[in-house]
Amino acid sequence: MPSVEFSNITKKYGTVTVIEGLNLTVADGEFLVLLGPSGCGKTTLLNMLAGLQDITAGTIRIDGNDVTDLDPKDRGLAMVFQSYALYPTKTVRGNLKFGLAAQKLNRAEIERRVAWAADLLQITALMDRKPAQLSGGQRQRVAIGRALVKNVGVFLFDEPLSNLDAKLRTEMRMEIKRLHEEVKSTIVYVTHDQIEAMTMATKIAVMDGGVIQQYGTPDEIYEHPSNRFVAGFIGAPAMNFLDGTTTTTAGGDGTVTAKLADDRTIDLSGYPFEKPPEPGRAITLGLRPEHFELPEANGQALFRLPVRSTERTGSDATIYLGIGDDLIAVRADPAFARNVKVGEEVPVSFPSGKANVFDARSGQRM
Ligand SMILES: Nc1ncnc2c1ncn2[C@@H]1O[C@H](COP(=O)(O)OP(=O)(O)O)[C@@H](O)[C@H]1O
Ligand SMILES: [Mg+2]
């Protein structure tokens, strides 16, 4: 399957630069998710790859070949849009076949591909219906089928699940992942939804402001965010951020601690600093809700903090604790969260090796 390579891509709309000097390589067979907030340039990048939008500067290669100036239909890719863009007057079969209109194929081959895609997407029973007679999820399957029949090496998806309800989104996530495993094509998938990225991607490129902030596997990005933006964007409830300054304990053994705004200190001796920071450096501590520990009432605890509110979702619970003027989200056992009272102080610890430390000024991981 083909690889995709963006080299030094710049895109301007008039005088506004939305992407500048972007480099990204998608290996063959990869499921790359471009993840970022609305307006960060995801669709622009995808449309440039598809040939639907021109490029101000830079080169795009597919399978090693420069396609920068090629017509969309000559690039060997198929795209699935957020608005399914089905033909309302055509049946499901007609919509699937229409995807092949530009390719000169004999009737038997067209029938074979349509039947194959319909079977893969489990829409064979719907072939004679019109889009208006389908549910949202079924329409989305037809839109995917129309791309699948083209039998290309690269599939592009632009937020294809945004219009579906939560349950269908979960189903379609599994479906698209299964399709990728079966068809083994290269996929570039755009979304603002971190759950889609975490569950489907083999690699994620996190974007903000037209810039790729981090590229890596879902685990690398979750466990080792390279800056504060990525750290805050991935994870629900979001990572807690606390401002502090570094201090070094007397005696000169080099142990680093973080002094928080309310004069509490957190030991960072277990944190793998790339380079030990000098004392007095302004930092932002990033602490994931699930890494806090809530020891027994008399156990060793770092802090005792007041409960401000609790949130239970059945299988899971989050309690919000006050620390100075801030709130921190702490993942808790639902049974614990049920019994705890607002205003009550609970003991809480944090294993320092699980902390993330960012430079307060640059936001970069330290
Ligand atoms: N045709 C256009 N003309 C001018 N600005 C545009 C146009 N299309 C997109 N933009 C701007 O480019 C930026 C990136 O847009 P887009 O790629 O659609 O973001 P995303 O898909 O990540 O939400 C946004 O600031 C958007 O307002
Ligand atoms: Mg978009």
Image (tube, rainbow, N blue to C red):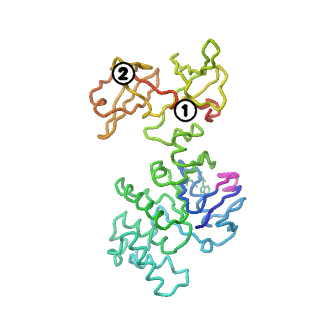
Residue 174 found in image quarter? bottom left
* Residue found at x 59% / y 53%: 41
Classify 262 as above or below 214. above
> At 39% across and 33% down in the image, what residue appears?
331
Which amino acid does the dot numbered 1 rest on?
Asn
Q: Name the residue beneath numbered marker 2.
A: 346
- Number of marks present in the image shown: 2
Which percent across, then down, holds residue 57? 72, 59
Quadrant for the N terminus in the image: bottom right
Query: In the displayed image of the protein, which residue is found farthest to the front?
Result: 253
Question: Which residue occupies the extreme top position in the image?
Answer: 251
Q: Which residue is mark 1?
A: 356
Secondary structure mainly formed by the magenta segment: strand
Q: Position of residue 157 (x, y in %)?
A: 51, 61
Residue neighbourhood size for the residue with mark 2, other residues' Cα within 10 Å, grouped as few (<14), some (14–19), many (≥20)? some
Q: Is mark 1 within 8 Å of ligand 1?
A: no
- Going from N to C along the chain, the mark reached first, 2 or 1, is 2
Q: Secondary structure at mark 2?
A: strand
Identify the residue at horizontal 59%, vertical 62% (top origin). Answer: 28
Of the four image quadrants, the one with ligand 1 is bottom right
Whether residue 181 is in magenta: the answer is: no
The magenta segment is 9-24
Using a 10 Å C-alpha cutoff, classify the residue at mark 1 as few (fewer than 14 neighbours), some (14 to 19) or many (20 or more). Answer: many
As for residue 15 lying within the magenta part, the answer is: yes
